[in-house]
Image: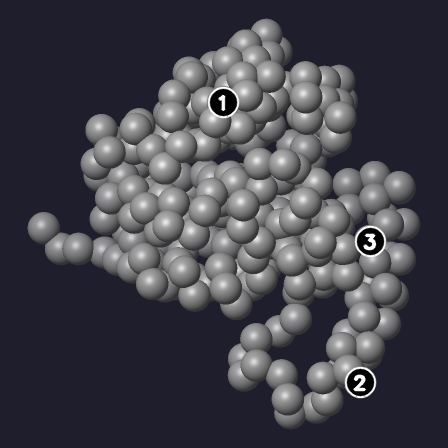
Amino acid sequence: MSFEYRKRIYDHYFKMHWVSINSTNMKQYENYCKISRKRFRNILPRDKSKKIIDIACGGGHFLYFLQQEGYTNTEGIDISPEMINFSRSIGIKNIKQSDLMRFLPKHKKSYDMIIAHDIIEHLTKDEIVRFLELIHTALKSDGKVLIATINNQTLFGSRDRYIDFTHETGFTALSLREILSACGFINIHIFGAKPVVYNLRSCIRAFLWNIVEKILRLYTTIEIGIGWGIKNQKHIFENRIYATARKPFKKK
């Protein structure tokens, strides 16, 4: 199946799309680090020599965070030459241009952790299955994947689904859990990108979000009705969702 539009857009993704919703100011990267230290502190491996790859690393935010935190065995790939050049220009190390579908099959059982932020929504359903299978194969036994994607269960889910022409698939917490399980992952945990407090402005935002979330939860209860929700599935209202999952441990 040919996707000519992908080449047209990804060859110039930095100028066409990325800079319209991101800042190239290093302050944004520093703030991202402050948020990530709290959001992922119980997710990242304690051993900072563990091998971690960020696939479709984009502007390199997560790699920058990992390298600032002292992780010594990190790397990243992205299909966009512009994104790679920009990431290198701000000092992010060990990144190269590559198509993840061609890269991962060459690195079986290589990684302790794989980061896949903001990529899965760009794939068709068949590609998603292949993508997750490749991640599963590229992970070491008991390795972990961390996925981030848009949450189409929110009030503005349609906006985020169609904000990028290259988006192919939308997710809810339930559908993301479903496909991860179908691809052989275990210990699946889904959570929303709640506001993280790191300065006064973020503190105010977190306070206001707590109020808004209570209103949304009340609205959902009224709309669906008590007892008509999906068993053991708590509604996530944040516009981004994260998933962590593990490859089953295999004794040698």
Say which amino acid is labelled 1: Lys
Q: In this view, does 129 lie to the left or right of 202?
A: left
Secondary structure state at the residue bearing disc 1: helix
* Residue designated by label 2: 222
- Tell me which amino acid carries mark 2: Ile
Mark 3 surroundings within 10 Å by alpha-carbon count, few (fewer than 14), some (14 through 19), many (20 or more): some
Mark closer to the chain start, 2 or 1? 1
Q: Name the residue under label 3.
A: 206
Tell me what residue is drawn at x 21 percent, y 36 percent: 108
- Crowd class of label 2 (few under 14; some 14 to 19; many from 20; radius 10 Å): few
Q: Quadrant of residue 60?
A: top right
Q: Is residue 29 among the parts visible in the rendering?
A: no
Residue 44 in picture, x, y percent from top left: 47, 43
* Mark 3 residue type: Ala
Q: Height in image: 251 above or below 162?
A: below
Give how far across and how far down residue 247 sits, in percent. 29, 53
Please determine whether, in this image, residue 240 is positioned above or below residue 227.
Answer: above
